[in-house]
Amino acid sequence: MMGSRKKPEELRSFRWFGVDSMRGFSHRSRMKQLGHRREDFVGRPVVAIVNTWSEINPCHAHLRERAESVKRGVWQAGGFPVEIPAFSITETYIKPSPMLYRNLLAMDTEELLRSLPVDGAVLMGGCDKTTPALIMGAISAGLPFVYLPAGPMLRGNWNGQALGSGTDVWKYWQERCAGTITEQDWNEIEDGIARSPGFCMTMGTASTMAALAEALGLTLPGASSIPAVDSNHKRMAIECGARIVEMVWEGFDTAGLLTREAFENAITVDMAIGGSTNAIIHLVALAGRCGVKLELKAFDAISRRVPVLANIRPSGTFLMEDFYYAGGIRALMAQIRDLLHLNCRTVNGGTVGENLQGARPVNTDVIRNREKPLAETGGTAILFGNLAPDGAVIKTSAADPQLLTHTGPAVVFKNYTDMADRIDREDLEITPDSVLVLQNAGPLGGPGMPEWGMLPIPGKLLRQGLRDMVRISDARMSGTAYGTCVLHVSPESFSGGPLALVKDGDQITLNVPGRRLDLNVSEAELADRRARWTRPSVKYERGYLSLYAERVTQAHEGCDFDFLQHGAETPEPEIH
């Protein structure tokens, strides 16, 4: 994990700043141009503060200020901080899908850490894709790093009710479509649902991935759920700055923390918090950067033995602010100590077991005891069958239990536009037993697996009182969303997977207890349809999106670029 304490001349940055050469002169003179003294940066750990702050990213609106706190910690510990901007992926605004750009931020992070004179990094992010992207890039760069999550926003408020971002958007949009709330109600909800910086305060992808970063040992203990505007968050930022300096001197191998056992801990925590289905794709991609192969069956096996203890929306009742003050992720992990690998090490130098000492829930309505779980088994199930040979995912903790075993006729939409055009038509032939199917919404078909998996309930069924039905796609679903939605069907329809062959009226069987998803059509008929199927044309033929279409892997493989997965290392840059 670490060797003997480094000498100043052994620092990576010393190759730029400490040598007596023309290039050394040039590097030092340019730092002096920035107003720094030679003794500030020569022979001290140079720490990159990789900041995904942006004025169009509300989840990270406070990170410009937090960077100053990280710098304070670095200076106090004897290091030299340099704040470096990285591509800011905002879940709200980036189209057609933020997932499309996770790999771009990962590449950005990897290359800035490799190419610049830095010895270690504090990564600052939080909005859904930024957590896995920053960590993926830092793993591949191979430098010591610690992750500082941006923290959740404060709970929303409307009409005396606590609102949760995402989850209550879907809920009240359905009610508006059904005519049960007024236009004024809707506008008031818009004003009150997001009222501070920070990521979604439900157990969406952002909160899930922050929790899993802590479970993997990549954050300081307790960092993952501090509300963004809580003063504890500022103090945690200082601690991160101080710790990374020591990690550099120690030669700390952060990527070396990420063993199979560490990933099993993360999967276990994911199931106990009722985490976002998106976490599966991200964990597979992170493991791929480490040379650890995570198969979907591992998620299902762990899910079967882990209870859901976090009573957080969309699976439960409360919000992340409540979760933090109930004890946070340390308290939850303490409840499942017997299911964790306690000897896994973490960035503070201690083990998971040591970091859990003294942790306990202070509100067992929010973080349930094992004797009274929110659900007896984990919140996610992995399905296989002739409709999903390489797997599909369903968040059982957010689904209607009565629909987890269901057979019904398919109503097929060829793409998102087709769905948007027809879903609310009065002449749409559909009943509550129907199974909505969306095609061409996967990694290539979207492109980028947009969060289209929570297909809307047709308006005429909403007005009849229906609030859930079986929905199947090769898309993803927001971690804040809910419903009986089968996601990540692999291989995707765009590449000729069985989902591409489904027609209106085909009977589809969902059997979650049996972990099956099947199209009840004969093999002979499917072979005939396959012979007549033609691949859709590629939408993008230039730039990054062309690279994405050429090299991205399928959902069950993590949707990383094949050339970025673990393998041959990129050599350190030569300095001439």
Image (cartoon, rainbow, N blue to C red):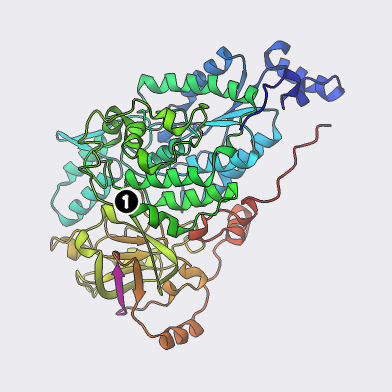
Asked whether 56 falls inside the magenta stretch, the response is: no
Query: Is 216 in front, or is 44?
Result: 216
Toward the viewer: 572 or 188? 572
Magenta residues (range): 505-512
Q: Residue at x 57, y 43 (%)?
A: 106
Depth check: give the residue in front, 342 or 286. 342
Looking at the image, residue 175 sits to the left or right of residue 443; the answer is left
* Frontmost residue, 150 versus 326: 326
Q: Is residue 574 above or below residue 490?
A: above
Instruction: Please report the residue visible at 32 percent of the width from the left and 32 percent of the height from the top.
Output: 331
The reply to whether residue 89 is visible in this rendering is yes
Q: Is residue 127 visible?
A: no
511 in magenta: yes
At which x and y percent is residue 535? 53, 74
In the rendered structure, which amino acid carries the disc numbered 1?
Answer: Gly
What is the count of numbered marks?
Answer: 1
Q: Position of residue 423 (x, y in %)?
A: 28, 66
Residue name at image x 35 percent, y 44 percent: 204
Please tell me whether residue 246 is drawn above or below residue 265 in the rendered image: above
Q: Residue at x 13, y 63 (%)?
A: 464
x and y, in percent, of residue 552 in the image: 57, 58
Magenta part mainly helix, strand or loop?
strand
- SS under mark 1: loop
Q: Which residue is mark 1?
A: 378
Q: Farthest residue to the right: give it.
A: 21
**The C terminus appears in which quarter of the rendering?**
top right
Place of residue 296 in the rendered image (x, y in percent of width and height, measured from the top left)? 45, 58
Rendered image quadrant of residue 483: bottom left
Q: Looking at the figure, which quarter contains the N terminus?
A: top right
- Quick check: 575 left or right of 206? right
